[in-house]
Image: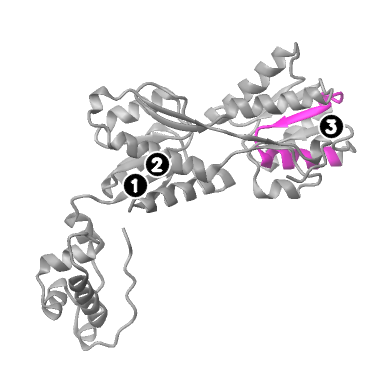
């Protein structure tokens, strides 16, 4: 859906009263139905007629009614995106990928933001998106498989795809390979002879955080190691700082710290600096996500690169695959896992600036 931006006009019609689509039709010499098709960006209007209508719209200063446009559409050409917020880089870049993929298919994206994953809040947000006649919804927030399945069953006529939910029969899920990223991180630290490793994990309700935790622990176990400590944070640099301070007080012998994302690693670096612990000489530090600023940390941060725009694009592609499914009763699941890349930098004594 394209938004037509009408420049100011000095037409006497706009001064005398509200211009209607009938006025546009009269000036353009077409039917009111044709005006409706043009303002709704329908494809069954030839270029000459479309130009006449757009010229009349500009001359009269007509502003199409949003509600009338929605009511007049057979298909809304809209996708919905439900997210917690855009405070973190990953959420914003995933949204950008979703928008790009939707635009390439002739769709616009309506964004719903909620401050909670509580069932009533999520249901309310989905209802608002459906009320705007979206054809499908991407949910970019942590939900359990049970919660996600319940939503799909509650709204069987609205395709829904998920980016922070475990692969489950009947669901469309697209995620980065969080376990692999965590495994590569721990193997890197062990190769550097670090065996007293602590973990700063993300929120308990996040599937991504849980998969990273599982990857760390399973890889440590493969090498007959246990973490020195495990703390749970909220993805923020402030929490990374506070938790790292606690770790250093209770476990002064730790020699490596794996953080669930780059922001928490940033806070941890500050705590280590204040404690007189040099990175990487005394403690190695790693993050996850490879946000653009991570290379500018002091020292530059070893991390795991996720392609967030690709994640957004792939989840839209999976959603459209679901929408094109000939028989929804036969539909089982679409589950995709995106590759990640381990990036070694100076925070683990590698000195690279990749």
Query: Residues at badges 2 and 1 in contact (C-beta under 8 Å)?
Result: yes
Q: Is residue 87 left or right of residue 168?
A: right
Q: Is residue 49 left or right of residue 156?
A: left
Query: In this view of the protein, can residue 110 be seen by the observer?
Result: no
Query: Residues at badges 3 and 2 in contact (C-beta under 8 Å)?
Result: no
* Mark 2 vs 1, N-terminal side: 1
Query: In this view of the protein, can residue 164 be seen by the observer?
Result: yes
Which element is circle 3 on? loop
Which numbered dot is residue 79?
A: 1
Point 16% across, 73% down: residue? 20
Asked where in the image residue 19 lies, by quadrant, the reply is: bottom left
Q: Distance of mark 3 from mark 1, alpha carbons?
A: 46 Å
* Mark 3 vs 2, N-terminal side: 3
Is 134 in front, or is 44?
Answer: 44
| View extreme (front): residue | 47
Residue 122, position as x, y percentages in the image: 39, 37
Which numbered dot is residue 316?
A: 2
Q: Which residues are magenta?
A: 250-273
Which element is circle 1 on? strand
Q: Is residue 92 part of the magenta span, yes or no? A: no
Is 28 in front, or is 14?
Answer: 28
Residue 288, position as x, y percentages in the image: 66, 36
Residue 220, position as x, y percentages in the image: 72, 17
Point 33% across, 36% down: residue? 321
Q: Nearer the viewer, mark 2 or mark 1?
A: 2
Which numbered dot is residue 250?
A: none
Image quarter (top left, top right, bottom left or bottom right) of the N terminus:
bottom left
Q: Distance of mark 3 from mark 2, alpha carbons?
A: 41 Å
Image quarter (top left, top right, bottom left or bottom right) of the C terminus:
top right
Q: Distance of mark 2 from mark 1, alpha carbons?
A: 9 Å
Which numbered dot is residue 283?
A: 3
């Amino acid at each position: 859906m394209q938004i037509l931006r009408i420049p100011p006009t000095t037409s006497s019609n706009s001064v005398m009263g509200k211009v209607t689509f009938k006025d546009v039709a009269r000036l353009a010499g077409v039917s009111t139905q044709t005006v409706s098709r043009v303002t709704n960006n329908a494809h069954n209007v030839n270029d000459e007629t479309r130009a006449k209508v757009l010229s009349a719209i500009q001359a009269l200063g007509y502003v199409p009614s949003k509600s009338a446009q929605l009511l007049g559409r057979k298909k809304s050409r809209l996708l919905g995106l439900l997210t917690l917020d855009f405070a973190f880089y990953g959420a914003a870049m995933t949204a950008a990928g979703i928008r790009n993929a939707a635009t390439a298919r002739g769709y616009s994206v309506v964004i719903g933001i909620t401050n909670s994953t509580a069932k009533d809040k999520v249901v309310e947000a989905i209802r608002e998106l459906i009320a705007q006649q979206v054809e499908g919804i991407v949910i970019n927030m942590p939900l359990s498989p049970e919660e996600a399945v319940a939503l799909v069953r509650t709204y069987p006529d609205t395709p829904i795809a998920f980016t922070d939910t475990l692969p489950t029969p009947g669901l469309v899920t697209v995620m980065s390979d969080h376990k692999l990223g965590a495994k590569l991180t721990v193997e890197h630290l062990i190769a550097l002879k670090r065996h007293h490793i602590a973990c700063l994990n993300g929120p308990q309700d996040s599937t991504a955080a849980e998969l990273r935790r599982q990857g760390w622990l399973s890889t440590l176990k493969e090498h007959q190691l246990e973490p020195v400590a495990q703390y749970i944070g909220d993805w923020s640099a402030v929490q990374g700082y506070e938790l790292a301070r606690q770790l250093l007080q209770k476990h002064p012998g730790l020699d490596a710290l794996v953080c669930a994302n780059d922001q928490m690693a940033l806070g941890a670096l500050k705590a280590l600096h204040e404690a007189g612990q040099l990175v990487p000489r005394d403690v190695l530090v790693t993050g996850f996500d490879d946000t653009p600023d991570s290379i500018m940390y002091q020292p530059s941060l070893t991390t795991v690169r996720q392609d967030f725009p690709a994640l957004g694009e792939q989840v839209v592609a999976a959603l459209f695959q679901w929408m094109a499914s000939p028989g929804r009763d036969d539909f089982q699941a679409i589950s995709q896992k995106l590759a990640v890349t381990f990036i070694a930098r100076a925070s683990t004594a590698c000195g690279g600036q990749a």
